[in-house]
Image (tube, helix red, strand yellow):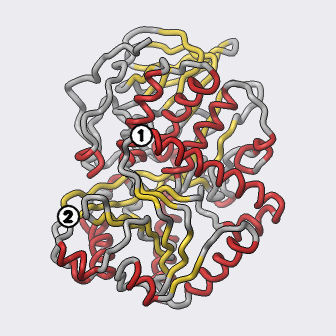
């Protein structure tokens, strides 16, 4: 049966560039998208089911209509016959999903595979690697169904300092010898001659798994597939409160109460305190800036020798992520402000522009056509969680990708769908599935919203330290 067609509200609330999930409880209602290149080039959004307009009873409510929420709803319908209702405060893919760099990598979280071994031992690391590989395959399978401008070929990990080459050599060896990846090391000249003339490069590690995508086209594809299977997607329907009575969850939205037998939270970097007790202060939202240039001319492509369209990151802790897009623009992103209130300060975007110019001196005068920022969901131990925090309560969450959510969010949605459907899997014994998000020890005394500024002081100190390590030593 074809889904009902109802358009989103024609009159959108203005985009708020200063929204900060650490201090703001309300993400808004029906706000317009951030002014990203992806929004400008994705085409018309798919039909949705309009805002919630009356009380309703549903089997499953998913909070958040980004990659994770839409993938969860899609897999619930496709693999378990459950037609979920997705509740979104603003527009489909309004948050992380329409503001990232579109880099799909065989990774999740911020830890390297050598760090997995250090933290959990080799047997668990091998099992986790198999799961992350399966996740990348889930992502590739969905990409193959959707017109989202995929650019496969691998991931180039650029050493921005000579001393970082030893780190990359060790990581490449671990990936080859322990996990069986066909990684290879490239000299500075090989990078510049065969891939891109990045003036910031001292060499690189190349790994074969990596795919760039148009993230908003991909999300819209998830939504179309899900709605064909009976999923309902309600924008402009923020969850303003939740309580549970006799096993039923009552989610308050401006248009009515949604009574659900199960709830899955997929709010990513836009997870505000007060959403649900299991998520309060468990995610540190971090701002990331991104820009997209005008299309490069043939002379500029020659001057930069930008031969590759593979996804690229560098070895800075405050890393740059960048690539040449299918229409020959350059997209580059990195860290941004500490707080939402300071996000529009030009000095933060200047850091990004300076990074572009250092890497590609020939592009010093190139026009920037699009610039934006958005929140990234970083867990305090740098790894994601796909959890049912309380076995007696049908509440679930999938968050904490740390900037590596473009690809793994697809598999996280698949796994959260399994958990919501009550399926048991040996994979759920892995660390990302069998332990809750936790408070970091340093924040034990500053968990509440009132102490958010103190956490930001710590972040400011760390950023200064990382900058010194990245650029001065």
Q: What percent of the width, then of the height, locates residue 218?
A: 41, 42
Indicate the secondary structure of the residue bearing disc 2: loop
Corner quadrant of residue 107:
bottom right
**Depicted 277 relative to depicted 306: above or below:** above
Dot 1 corresponds to which residue?
146
Is 191 on the left or on the right of 266, as rendered?
A: left
Is 110 on the left or on the right of 222, as rendered?
A: right
**Depicted 55 relative to depicted 45: above or below:** above
Question: How many numbered dots are placed on residues in this image?
Answer: 2
Q: CA distance from mark 2 to mark 1?
A: 24 Å
Is 462 on the left or on the right of 299, as rendered?
A: right
Q: What percent of the width, then of the height, locates residue 416?
A: 64, 35
**Depicted 56 relative to depicted 382: above or below:** above
Q: Nearer the viewer, mark 2 or mark 1?
A: 1
Which residue is pictured at 65% across the width and 61% down the height? 442
Which residue is pictured at 48% across the width and 47% down the height? 269
Q: What percent of the width, then of the height, locates residue 31?
A: 29, 34
Image quarter (top left, top right, bottom left or bottom right) of the N terminus: top left
Which residue is pictured at 37% across the width and 26% down the height? 235
Q: What percent of the width, then of the height, locates residue 95?
A: 40, 43
Is 434 on the left or on the right of 398, as rendered?
A: right
Corner quadrant of residue 345:
bottom left
Query: Mark 2 or mark 1, which has the lower sequence index?
Result: 1
Q: State the mark number for residue 338.
A: none
Pick the residue in front: 468 or 174. Answer: 174
Indicate the secondary structure of the residue bearing disc 1: loop
Which residue is pictured at 76% across the width and 44% down the height? 427
**Depicted 20 relative to depicted 8: above or below:** below
Corner quadrant of residue 332:
bottom left
Q: Residues within 10 Å of mark 2 (few under 14, many from 20)?
A: some
Q: State the mark number for residue 295.
A: 2
Pick the residue in front: 236 or 24. Answer: 236
């Amino acid at each position: 049966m074809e889904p009902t067609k109802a358009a989103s509200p024609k009159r959108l609330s203005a985009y708020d560039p200063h929204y900060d999930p650490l201090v703001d409880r309300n993400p808004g209602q029906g706000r317009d998208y951030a002014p990203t290149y992806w929004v400008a080039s994705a085409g018309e959004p798919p039909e949705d089911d309009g805002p919630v307009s009356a009380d309703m009873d549903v089997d499953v409510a998913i909070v958040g209509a980004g990659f994770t929420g839409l993938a969860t709803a899609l897999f619930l319908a496709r693999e378990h016959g459950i037609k979920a209702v997705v509740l979104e405060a603003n527009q489909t893919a309004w948050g992380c999903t329409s503001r990232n760099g579109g880099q799909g990598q065989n990774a999740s979280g911020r830890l390297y595979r050598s760090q997995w071994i250090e933290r959990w031992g080799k047997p668990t690391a091998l099992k986790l690697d198999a799961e992350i590989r399966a996740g990348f395959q889930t992502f590739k399978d969905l990409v193959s169904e959707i017109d989202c401008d995929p650019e496969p070929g691998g991931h180039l990990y650029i050493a921005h300092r000579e001393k970082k080459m030893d780190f990359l050599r060790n990581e490449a060896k671990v990936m080859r010898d322990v996990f069986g990846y066909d990684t290879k090391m490239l000299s500075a000249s090989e990078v510049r001659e065969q891939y891109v003339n990045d003036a910031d490069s001292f060499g690189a590690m190349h790994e074969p798994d990596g795919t760039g995508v148009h993230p908003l086209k991909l999300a819209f594809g998830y939504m179309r597939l899900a709605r064909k299977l009976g999923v309902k997607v309600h924008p402009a329907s923020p969850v303003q409160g939740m309580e549970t009575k006799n096993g039923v969850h009552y989610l308050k939205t401006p248009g009515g109460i949604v009574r659900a037998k199960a709830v899955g939270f997929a709010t990513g970097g836009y997870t505000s305190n007060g959403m649900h007790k299991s998520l309060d202060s468990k995610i540190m939202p971090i701002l990331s800036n991104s820009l997209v240039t005008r299309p490069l001319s043939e002379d500029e492509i020659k001057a930069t020798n930008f031969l590759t369209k593979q996804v690229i990151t560098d070895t800075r802790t405050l890393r740059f992520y960048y690539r040449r897009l299918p229409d020959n623009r350059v997209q580059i992103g990195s860290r941004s402000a500490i707080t939402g209130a300071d996000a529009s300060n030009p000095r933060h975007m200047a850091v990004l522009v300076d990074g572009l110019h250092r890497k590609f001196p020939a592009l010093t005068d190139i026009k920037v056509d699009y610039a934006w920022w958005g929140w990234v969901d970083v867990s305090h131990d740098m790894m994601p969680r796909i959890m049912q925090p309380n076995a007696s309560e049908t509440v679930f969450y999938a968050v904490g990708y740390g900037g590596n959510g473009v690809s793994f969010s697809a598999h996280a949605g698949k796994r959260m769908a399994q958990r919501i459907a009550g399926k048991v899997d040996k994979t759920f014994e892995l660390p990302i599935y069998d332990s809750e998000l936790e408070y970091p020890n340093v924040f034990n005394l500053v968990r509440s919203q009132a102490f958010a500024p103190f956490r930001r002081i710590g972040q400011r100190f760390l950023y200064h330290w990382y900058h010194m390590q990245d650029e001065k030593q």
